[in-house]
Image: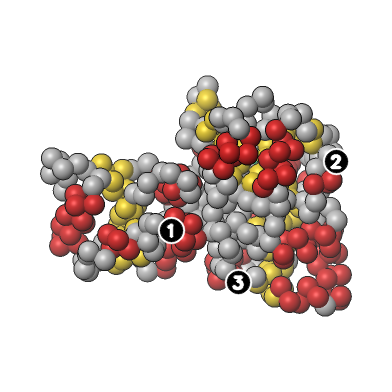
Amino acid sequence: MIAMLTTLKITAHDLNNPEIADSLKATLLSGGLVIFPTETVYGIGGHALDPQAAAAIYAAKGRPSDNPLIVHVARFDQIDALAYREQPYIDALAQAFWPGPMTLVLRKKAIVPDGTTGGLSTVAVRIPSHPVAQTVLRLVDVPIAAPSANLSGKPSSTSFSHVEADFLGKVDVLIDGGDVPIGLESTVIDATGSTPVILRPGAITQEMIEAVLHEDVLDHSESLIDGAPKSPGMKYKHYAPQARLEIVAGSDEAVVRFLRQAIAQDPHIGILGPSELLDQLQGGIRFDLGSRTHLEAMAHQLFAALRALDDQQVPHAYFIAVNEAGVGKAIMNRIYKAANHRIITLDESSKGTP
Ligand code: AMP
Ligand code: MG
């Protein structure tokens, strides 16, 4: 049982007030927790070199302690204190994508406590670009461990109402920065070997990485290596709404036919997908994620839509699959997990019934 805290709610603007800034710094340096917006999702931050702060993050999230935290710093010159930059491509990736939604897994230095890395010999590091995240990091001038600010297993928080719902009374400070710009967690890349390996797809896509490095990179985000997930987080339940979520994939005609039948059988069925197909449906509880010609905009709506399923107590929902090119890969990666890999594949000849 975690004791209830008095949570201070502030806005990004309040960080300009020297008294508030000083007290925020004192909170983080003494092991307290602060939730702040980043360009990907909201993060729950604590002093990354203080094992007790890391333990407090795990406790507040209800996160299994072998699922390591991402360590955030403001500037590239802070990386070398934490980890070894062994591969030549690391600097090229940093140059291209930092500050930004990319996390690199590097071999850690002894200063990073096992409590932050779940006992691994590597540490995941990121330089966020969001101005509020940058302000917080520069203010404290220590590395901040900041996993996604959601209760373990739930969708990440992309707006302030999400963090209030999950963490009021459980952390010291919440910083309201409005809706986050991207809405999907960072691309995680294992940068310990001679070839970079994508462990979690995100807004920095495989295509973008390959264009910078002029070489093929590997994507292990869906694979189990030697029977054990390469990134510890992969084995846990993720993003799951209370609804039983299923993916439907197939031609537009087959998907629309299937969903019309599903709505006829159950008018309370939830349907998440692109406008192009939702516009062809009536009834059901529809969550329009926008045009599939704008996958970034669909990604931005995704977690809010999953949370809305819970808010509206929808018991059963379908997600219409999108093409896995570009950011579509990251969208489908999150949805496979949210749906516990349940997928209904329709083709013209199949008589798939809801
Ligand atoms: P979150 O902080 O909630 O965005 O999740 C961080 C993700 O990065 C999880 O999937 C972790 O398993 C992964 N991660 C963090 N540190 C490491 C590491 N040292 N090696 C591999 N994956 C990591
Ligand atoms: Mg997370």
**Location of residue 267 in the rendering, given as x and y in whole percent from the top left corner:** 21, 66
- The residue positioned 80% from the left and 47% from the top of the image is 76
Q: In the picture shown, does residue 225 fall above or below 9?
A: above
Q: CA distance from mark 3 to mark 2?
A: 32 Å
Nearer to us in this view, 207 or 31: 207
Mark on residue 178? 3
On the image, numbered disc 1 is attached to which residue?
294
Q: Secondary structure at mark 1?
A: loop
Disc 2 CB within 8 Å of nearest ligand 1 atom:
no
Q: Give the residue type at disc 1.
A: His
- The residue positioned 34% from the left and 58% from the top of the image is 273
- The residue positioned 58% from the left and 63% from the top of the image is 181
Q: Nearer the viewer, mark 2 or mark 1?
A: 1
Q: Are marks 2 and 1 in contact (CB under 8 Å)?
A: no
Q: Secondary structure at mark 2?
A: loop
- The residue positioned 80% from the left and 67% from the top of the image is 24
Q: Give the residue type at disc 3.
A: Gly
Mark on residue 81? 2
Q: In the picture shown, does residue 288 fall above or below 71?
A: below
- Within-10-Å neighbours for mark 2: few <14, some 14–19, many 20+: few
Q: Specify the quadrant of the image occupied by residue 286.
A: bottom left
